Image (cartoon, rainbow, N blue to C red):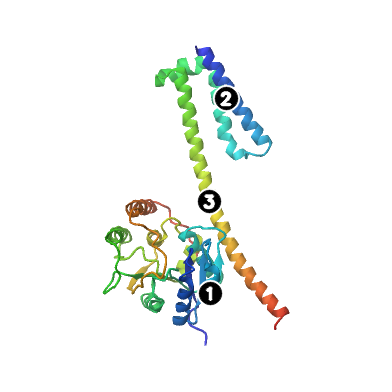
Amino acid sequence: MKPAFNLLVIIPAYNEEGSVGKVVGEVKDHLPEAVVLVVNDGSVDLTSEKANAAGAKVLELPYNLGIGGAMQAGYKYALEKGYDIAIQVDGDGQHDPKEILKLLKMLEEKEVDMVIGSRFIGVSEFRSSMMRRLGISVFSKVISLIVGQRITDPTSGFRAVGRKAIQLFSSKYPQDYPEPEVLVLLHKCGFKMAETPVGMNRRYSGESSITKIRSVYYMVKVLLAIFIDCFKRGPLLKTGG
Amino acid sequence: MLVQFQIIIGMLSLVLLLITFELIRKERLREEYSILWLFTGGVTLIFSLFPEFFLSTFITRITGLYYLSAVVVIAFIFLLVIVLHFSVVISKLTDRNKELAQRHALLKLEFDELKKQVLFIRNPS
């Protein structure tokens, strides 16, 4: 039987040879009907080979575009191939693939355009450094204020989006700090979003891209980018198609 | 004093104009990016040819600047405009470059899958 929706799981990966195979495998275990697309953002290691061996399709960028450009490439693929739902999962294994079902359920029940898997709703085993939690809580307050709804985890890269948002993202996706900026973009376009609690794993390998020393600098830059986003013109949306 | 500055600035703007012109002629500089440079060279050349008219009477009276500092300030403002213009151009190129990289990746995946299918049809074993 054909599933009600066709699903694409997009996994951006930059030098994640140590974890990407395992992530792809786990996603396939929990969602056998979904197609898994690994976007290799110009890795210099065996990310593509590992992903391929695990049974994923691999979109290979010729050089590193950054997380924004990589995610957008995935959304372009989703649009071109006519997927109804796209799910973003980080390639480092910090997202638990069995939680995807929760995201999907929420997307369907609440009839929203995007569901964010939040680490901070309800009971969560997620632990991270003081600085990081502080930064996320500041983003959360600012973003909540802008979009007029409570967003507890604006930097989470664990998301499910519907057809309308796929269309929007493939034509316009923020490049610099996509996770929080996307929320402002969606709000400007009048799209709806919701959050659902998810559990997280520790990273299988690799380091967070944000180190402690740079976190304050990072925070200021993201807040500035969000501030400027508030004044950007929203994209002209093509209806239908 | 003024005449020496006049000659130096006049020569410099002539050299700038000549270099710009030569670059356009050899198609190493596109016309759309050359207009600001030609304009800068042209304006400074006019300043060196008619310093009394442009500076003693008009700009000096408004800004209180002396000839050399006035020319330097004006050239500096032009340079700022040119550099800003370049930032805009680079941003545009970066964006196009990103689109191209994404399109390349999408086509490559499509191509690899088609190739696999063709090989399978030709050689099903």
Residue placed most toward the observer, A91 or B79: A91
Residue B94: numbered disc = 3
| B107 relative to B51, above or below | below
Residue A79 appears in the rendering: no
Residue holding disc 1: A56
The quarter of the picture where residue B7 lies is: top right
Find numbered disc 2 in the image and state the secondary structure of the residue it sits on: helix
Looking at the image, residue B117 sits to the left or right of residue A198; the answer is right
User: Which residue is most to the bottom?
Assistant: A1
Image height check: is A49 above or below A98? above
Quadrant of residue A89 within the rendered picture? bottom left
| Distance CA(mark 2)–CA(mark 1) | 60 Å
Relative height, residue A13 to residue B117 (above, below): above
- Give the residue pinned by disc 2: B13
In the displayed structure, does residue A230 sit left or right of residue A62? Answer: left
Q: Is residue A95 visible?
A: yes
Q: Chain of mark 3?
A: B
Chain ID for label 1? A
**Mark 2 in CB contact with mark 3 (< 8 angstroms):** no
**Which-is-in-front pick, marks 2 and 1?**
1
Which of the marked residues, 2 or 3, is nearer the chain's N terminus?
2
Q: Nearer the viewer, residue A70 or A80?
A: A70
Label 1 element class: loop
Chain letter, disc 2 residue: B
Identify the amino acid type marked 3. Answer: Thr
Cα–Cα gap, marks 2 and 3: 32 Å
Q: Amino acid at mark 2?
A: Ser
Tell me where residue A194 appears, x and y as whole percent.
34, 70
In the rendered image, residues at marks 2 and 1 fall on the same chain: no
Q: Amino acid at mark 1?
A: Ala
Q: Position of residue B104 (x, y in %)?
A: 60, 61
Q: Nearer the viewer, mark 3 or mark 1?
A: 1
